[in-house]
Image (cartoon, coloured by chain):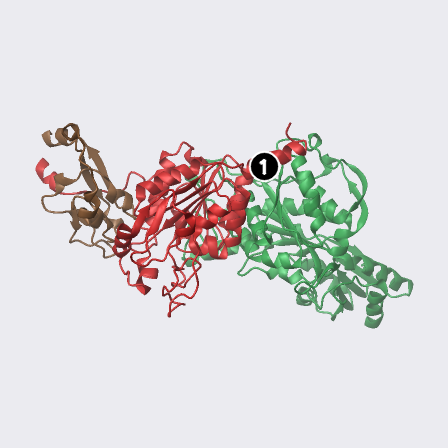
Amino acid sequence: MDQKLEELKLLKPGTYFMMGNIACAEAALIAGCEFYAGYPITPSNEIAEHMSRRMPELGRHFIQMEDEIASAVAILGASAAGVKAMTATSGPGFSLMMESIGLAAMLELPCVIVDVQRAGPSTGIPTFVGQGDVMQARWGSHGDYELVAYAPSSVQEFFDLTIEAFNTSELLRIPVIVLADEVVGHMYGKLVVPEYSKINIVNRKKYTGPREKYLPYSCETLVPPFVAAGDGYRIHMTGLTHDERGYPSLEIDDSRKLIERLVMKVRKNAKNLWKYESYFMDDADVVVITFGVTARSSLEAVKRARAEGIKAGMLKLLTIWPFPEDPVRIAGEYAKRILVAEINMGQLIHPVKEVVRCPVVGINYPVGYAPPPEYILDGIRASV
Amino acid sequence: MVEVQVLREVVSSESPRDDLIRRERFPHIWCPGCGLGTVLKCYVEAIASSDIPRDKHVIVSGIGCSGRMAGYVNIDSYHVTHGRPIAFAEGMKIVRPDLEVTVISGDGDLVTIGGNHFIHAIRRNVDINVFLVNNFIYGMTGNQYGSTTPLGARSSTSPYGCPEYPFNLPLLAAALGAPFVARWTTLHVRQLAEAMKKAMKVKGFAFIEIISPCPVGFGSYNEMREGMDFIKFFLENCIVDHNADLNKVAISMRPGDPIILGNFVEREAPTYHDLEREVFRKAGWLK
Amino acid sequence: MNSISLKFVREPINKHLQKIPLGIIHVIPERCKECNYCIELCPRDVLKVGEERNFKGYRWPVIADGKALDCIACKMCEWICPEFAIFVKEVDRTEWIKS
């Protein structure tokens, strides 16, 4: 990554008409992803296919593993060796990766996992859309940990948030999930690649001091500096609860310090991580909170409701986890009613209910299809 | 005065290999008579005598008694989830081919829950070393039977005798094309360390099955309650045959049924890294 | 057991030229777990179970009576010890006894 972006064979700044999944792959290349491990699964395949062609062109590594478990673990191995790494998958594969997400959180290895959501549960409808992995993304692995999940609703956002995902994972040494969906992944849309100088790229902070003083899991800061395998620091990383040296520990103090740090490094930075967009929120009585593909039909529904004289607004969440509590709370203070539109039987509605006092109603659409604007409009009409 | 000193052993506080182990963590957690400490000893001796600089060595372990191995070697060491050390090592080795990545873990970890990663890593011929410590049982969880438990052997979940056939691991590894396949016991320390050294030199996937005593786990269910019971069994039943027919090296742990040891396979084959360079060439990255 | 391991040993024709090294045995009592491998596998039966116990209650190996000069520094005890609790420093037998 010492090379300048201009010198690499990356997607040049300009305007493109591109598929979401491919925009995601190109964004990963710009962000500096040097290792991709994946397993074929619909509807995320285009990411792997594109990476398999593009990564070797840049001297970077693409490998197709034997399953999603291996893919998720292999990217952690690469991350431990000091490079940026990612994988992409969909529901069933995402389920298999849960164990490794916990490992990434525990070892504090940066990595990006793209989940192009399909209709579930189980095999569901692999080629159709769903938004049923919202809770799994946050709570899928056992134990206490925090991570960040972004949800794009357009090709442009898929591109931007993939770069952002790499940056956040490097900054906080956490696994970051890009919670896309089948429609956003397969959609062709406009993509503007800005000048490289305008793209912010974050690399993990490395430790360079003397070996004797290095504490790999020092609690002095929320995010301890990183050393890679082969750097000569003789680091030990373990998935067991460990002390600041990285050695397994059964002490209550070590456990408390470690788990608090794993959680607090996201919670304390939450405000900086929240990304959302407000539409017609100035005087909205009814607010639709939504994300991903659902935000597209919701926006149309809100516009039509306005034309009918209903004071509707929309809050599109780009960051799903950590949950953007403040903007949702503020929306709840001014609105009479909040609607949560999502392609599942009610997942994002739960954290919304946690933070607002006004009535919250879900607009849930049968899994597999993006709701048409009329469906959401009906929900808005019914709420006034 | 000198004569008095001759008669007694010298009491010391550190061993000559303490620089390669995390001595502040000793004594380790393994039971008296467990072979894992001996495997650790052989591994650090192999590191010490290998041509590869020490800070280029990396050890990855999984879960279980053997999984604790990584925590005791004073090199870059990673202790990952159950069954996954090979996948982790693959990711690491592919992006950093200059590292000498060694996986040391147990039979339950590497070939039972992690069996899929094992077979595919050999098939790809990724240049890692896998030293599998076979103690015939899941020790740390309380002595349940696994995929290497001999047919009929008792364990906490096979009180009537194990009803499953065990793996013949050298045959499996050789069939998948591993360039180096060996099997030793923890009694054959020098041969084991020598095989480890060879494995580090081998280009491609190097596999050593290490038969290890487990007196507290496997032994207590199968009338081998002391580590020495295993060592005596090894002394009486082990046969070294480098050219053995691998179809016939399955282990039954019955007296009189030999445990065949040796460096069974030593051959050359293009590694994943060689083949990946070909990809880089075709993609235009390498000329 | 010694009979098993020594039975196959061929007598070298230049035996009179061979120097038999002497090993000075070092133990780290706090690490010992009394598995007895060092004692049982010593080809010269140099070691025996000691009487003292370490903080974990294990008796570490000591040199058996009158056996100190029997050690030939084969280092089997050092290699087999799972605890890194015993090691042997090799010295020149003749020189060492002289001094």
The green-coloured chain is labelled: A
Q: Position of residue A79 (x, y in %)?
A: 56, 44
Q: Which chain is brown?
A: C
User: In the rendered view of the protein, which quadrant contains the N terminus of chain A?
Assistant: top right
In terms of image quadrants, where is residue A344?
bottom right
In this structure image, what is the colour of chain B?
Answer: red
Which residue: 36% across, 51% down? Answer: B211
Q: Nearer the viewer, residue B50 or C7?
A: C7
The image position of residue B132, as x and y in percent, is 42, 49
Q: Does dot 1 land on a helix, a strand or a loop? A: helix
Residue B45 left/right relative to C69: right
Query: Quick one: B27 or A9, which is closer to the camera?
Result: A9
Q: Where is residue B185 drawn, in percent x and y?
A: 33, 48
Residue holding disc 1: B275
On-image quarter of the C terminus of chain A:
bottom right
- Residue A347: quadrant of the picture: bottom right
In this rendering, the answer to whether A3 lies above or below B249 is above
Q: Is residue B16 left or right of residue A12?
A: left
Q: Is residue A222 visible?
A: no
Q: Chain of mark 1?
A: B
Near mark 1 (Cα within 10 A), the count class, few <14, some 14-19 or many ≥20, is few
In the image, residue B262 above or below residue A376: above
- How many numbered circles are shown? 1
Question: Does residue B207 appear in the picture of this structure?
Answer: yes
Residue type indicated by callout 1: Leu
Q: Residue A373 falls in which quadrant of the image?
A: bottom right
Which one is in front, A51 or A331? A51
Q: Residue at x 38, y 63 (%)?
A: B143
Residue B220 % position (x, y): 31, 63
Q: Is residue B133 above or below residue A284?
A: above
Q: Is residue A179 left or right of residue A203?
A: right
Q: Nearer the viewer, residue A129 or A365?
A: A129
